[in-house]
Amino acid sequence: MKENLREDLKMYLISDSDILKGRDFYKCIEDGLKAGVTMLQLREKNADGGEFLEKALKLRELTKKYNAKFIIDDRIDIALLCDADGVHVGQSDIDAKSARKLIGEGKILGVSARTLQEAKRA
């Protein structure tokens, strides 16, 4: 997986339905995938668990259709349920070592870091 990561990161889209101003969430994501998005991160801070899972399952189908990697923000449980390619955790979420243990070695793990110290810890 690491050998292809540079290619996978060419165009990285992070979802945020709050900025869509009424436009269709799935159409916007699919338009991005059609335009060449190579990695999609589902990051919906205002979605409850059920809505987040529903979006994750639908987006997993779309990312497979367009051969893009799929990352779930914060929710390792949902990443595992939808067989996402990886997970991204923040400093206030589960630590990187524990996240790696849960998702396994074959998945992508991203960690937010605002300082050099946080980056080294991650």
Image (cartoon, rainbow, N blue to C red):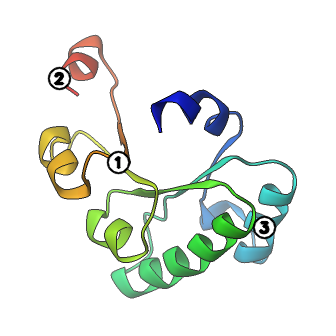
* Residue 69 pos. (x, y %): 58, 53
| Residue 11 lies in quadrant | top right
What is the spatial separation of the Cα atoms under label 3 and label 1, in whole angstroms? 26 Å
Left or right relative to 81: residue 8: right
* Residue 67 pos. (x, y %): 70, 58
Q: Around disc 3, counting alpha carbons within 10 Å, would you say few (fewer than 14), some (14 to 19), or many (20 or more)?
A: some
- Which numbered tag is attached to residue 121? 2
If you read the primary sequence from the N terminus, does the residue marked by circle 2 or circle 1 appear first? Answer: 1
On the question of residue 74 being in view, the answer is yes
- Amino acid type at circle 1 is Gly
- Which numbered tag is attached to residue 8? none
Residue under numbered circle 3:
30
Residue under numbered circle 1:
106
What is the spatial separation of the Cα atoms under label 2 and label 3, in whole angstroms? 35 Å
Query: Residue, x 65% and y 64% (percent of image)?
Result: 63
Q: Which marked residue is nearer to the observer: mark 2 or mark 1?
A: 1
* Residue 14 pos. (x, y %): 59, 51
| Residue 25 lies in quadrant | bottom right
- Amino acid type at circle 3 is Glu
